[in-house]
Image (cartoon, rainbow, N blue to C red):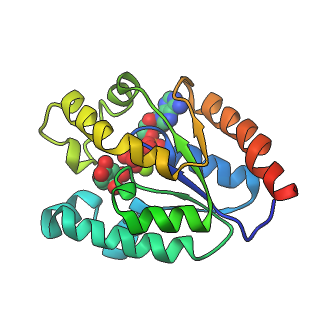
Amino acid sequence: MNPSCNLFIVGPTGAGKTTIGRRLADHYGLSFVDLDQEIERVCGVPVSTVFEIEGEAGFRQRESMLLAECSARGGVVMATGAGAVLDAANRRLLAERGYVLWLQATLEQQLERLAQDRARPLLAGVDRAERLTTMAQKRTSLYEEVADLAIPGEHETVHAASARSILLIDQYWQRQHAA
Ligand SMILES: Nc1ncnc2c1ncn2[C@@H]1O[C@H](COP(=O)(O)OP(=O)(O)OP(=O)(O)O)[C@@H](O)[C@H]1O
Ligand SMILES: O=C(O)C1=C[C@@H](O)[C@@H](O)[C@H](O)C1
Ligand SMILES: [Mg+2]
């Protein structure tokens, strides 16, 4: 593994970017950064409070600033927030500065995994299936645009999804670096 390289993870909410990203960082001996957690660390409050106080626009500004900062580090696995790809400058930085992994998930998987979740402000107090569908309509082509490698959402456990990701990363990304 070339430690100057980055692995960036994009995909819809509940796809496992945070959970699997951490495992990938452990596996490859890279440092792990989760953009949502970075925002919480810098602001000292949960993402939902940032949305309450600064609105989505304020959150997006912070997200872009931290994405620029963290992607410049080198040797990181970075889990992005599901909406980070909405911004064209974010997409450009992701594409330029690392290998981009797109973790996919079906609507059913998202609904099941996030059933108990109260931390995602864009899913609070709305029909979740409807909101997630609208998000997918707007975002799927953006994930596709920025991704180097897609991992289908057919893996029902974190362990299986991590193992599959490592297999594909080794097959495609590592090989490119070896070449
Ligand atoms: N492949 C999987 N199989 C089963 N459960 C999973 C899988 N991936 C993630 N999960 C579970 O789904 C939940 C959400 O995962 P996680 O927080 O990693 O998603 P995320 O992509 O980071 O979402 P967000 O974009 O909102 O940050 C967690 O409880 C996690 O354990
Ligand atoms: O879908 C989204 O736009 C979001 C996903 C989360 O990761 C957080 O970044 C925040 O809740 C917004
Ligand atoms: Mg996450």
137 in relation to 96, above or below: above
Q: In percent of the image, x 40 and y 69: which residue is there?
A: 89
Q: In which quadrant is the N terminus drawn?
A: bottom right
64 in relation to 145, above or below: below
- Give how far across and how far down residue 44 sits, in percent: 31, 72
153 in relation to 94, above or below: above
- Of 4 and 140, nearer the camera is 140
Q: In percent of the image, x 14 and y 62: which residue is there?
A: 52
- Give how far across and how far down residue 91 sits, in percent: 45, 61
* Left or right: residue 165 compared with residue 48: right
In the picture, residue 141 is in which quadrant? top left
As drawn, the residue found furthest toward the right would be 179
- Of 160 and 71, nearer the camera is 71
Q: In percent of the image, x 12 and y 39: which residue is there?
A: 125
Let me know if residue 35 appears in the view: yes
Let me know if residue 13 appears in the view: no
* Left or right: residue 32 compared with residue 92: right
